């Protein structure tokens, strides 16, 4: 079998050289669950397991970023950026998390097409700063999207990334989880200026025609976890 044919077969099977399954990047939300929240020493123990599990996943090379959110709906509690073979594997990364075990928090995830090299694993977990998570959802607009609109959209996001600190941005794949209903793109901006981002992104022709809707959410993560583009 030729090398080209072997590569095509491995790609079809989702397998890399050496027989190792390729891993997909996922944007994941911790969401409010049905379990009752513990108190006192139980809460302390659950919190320790929560952070210890994320540390273990980061050490294993499966978790690249994480942080709590300020969600107006109070449903989404935080995010992680992880890799997994498929969507079904994502919850297994959090089996050691007592919040997930006790269904105090659930796991919702969707594929995210970003460059993992833009995340910096060598950060101080105690040096936490504000970021902004931006979600673009498919809107109610009926006019057809044109290549010029798409090009203007992409140029605007890159421009806002330059004016509002580093940004990591990419398309969101299909997911049946409620947090990702109609979400088509996501970005993390290293900035505290959520109002400025929202105002700048409102000039997008896809937003003006309601083909896309923008949600800007306060997010806290380690300083330096998002590398500047080209670094």
Image (spheres, rainbow, N blue to C red):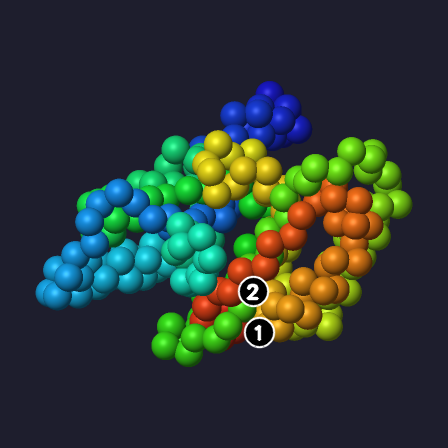
Residue 59 position, x and y percent, is: 34, 59
Helix, strand or loop status at disc 1: loop
User: In the rendered image of this protein, does residue 137 appear above or below residue 159?
Assistant: above
Estimate the x, y position of residue 200 in percent, counting from the top left.
Answer: 74, 64
Mark 1 vs mark 2, CA separation in Å: 7 Å
Q: Is residue 131 above or below residue 57?
A: below
Please tell me which residue lies in front, 170 or 193.
193
Classify mark 2: residues with Cα within 10 Å, few (<14), some (14-19) or many (20+): many
Residue for point 60% across, 54% down: 215
Label 1 or label 2, whichever comes before in sequence order: 2
Where does the image place residue 213, in percent across and percent down from the top left? Answer: 67, 48
Residue in the picture at 63% in, 44% down: 137
Q: Is residue 197 above or below residue 29?
A: below
Instruction: Using the image, tell me which numbered label, if any, was put on residue 82.
Output: none
Tags 1 and 2 touching, CB below 8 Å: yes
User: Circle 2 — which element?
Assistant: strand
Q: Is residue 55 visible?
A: yes
The part of the image, by quadrant, that contains residue 139 is: top right
Of the pair 143 and 19, the residue shown nearer to us: 143
The residue depicted at 30 percent of the width and 48 percent of the height is: 105
Residue at numbered disc 1: 192
Question: Considering the image in quadrants, where does the C terminus appear?
Answer: bottom right
Tag 1: Cα neighbours inside 10 Å, few (<14), some, or many (≥20)? some
Counting from the top left corner in percent of width and height, residue 181 is at: 54, 38
**Is 199 drawn above or below residue 6 in the view shown?**
below
Q: Is residue 46 left or right of residue 229?
A: left
Q: Which residue is mark 2?
A: 132
Left or right of 20? Residue 200 is right
Give the farthest residue toward the right.
148
Could you tell me which quadrant the N terminus lies in?
Answer: top right
Would residue 100 be seen by someone viewing this image from the given angle?
no
Q: Residue furthest bottom?
A: 127
């Amino acid at each position: 079998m030729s090398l080209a044919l072997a590569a095509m077969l491995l790609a079809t099977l989702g397998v890399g050289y050496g027989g190792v399954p390729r891993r997909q990047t996922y944007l994941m939300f911790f969401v409010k669950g049905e379990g009752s929240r513990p108190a006192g020493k139980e809460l302390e123990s659950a919190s320790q397991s929560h952070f210890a599990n994320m540390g273990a996943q980061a050490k294993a090379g499966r978790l690249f970023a994480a942080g709590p959110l300020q969600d107006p709906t109070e449903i989404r509690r935080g995010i992680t950026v992880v890799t997994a073979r498929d969507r079904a594997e994502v919850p297994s990364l959090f089996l050691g998390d007592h919040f997930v075990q006790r269904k105090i928090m659930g796991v919702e995830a969707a594929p995210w097409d970003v460059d993992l090299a833009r995340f910096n694993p060598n950060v101080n977990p105690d040096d936490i700063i504000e970021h902004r998570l931006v979600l673009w959802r498919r809107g109610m607009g009926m006019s057809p999207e044109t290549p010029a609109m798409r090009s203007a959209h992409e140029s605007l996001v890159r421009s806002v990334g330059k004016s509002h600190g580093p940004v990591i941005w990419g398309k969101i794949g299909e997911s049946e989880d409620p947090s990702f209903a109609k979400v088509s793109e996501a970005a993390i901006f290293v900035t505290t200026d959520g109002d400025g981002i929202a105002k700048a992104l409102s000039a997008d022709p896809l937003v003006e025609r309601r083909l896309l809707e923008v949600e800007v959410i306060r997010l806290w993560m380690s300083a330096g976890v998002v590398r500047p583009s080209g670094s």
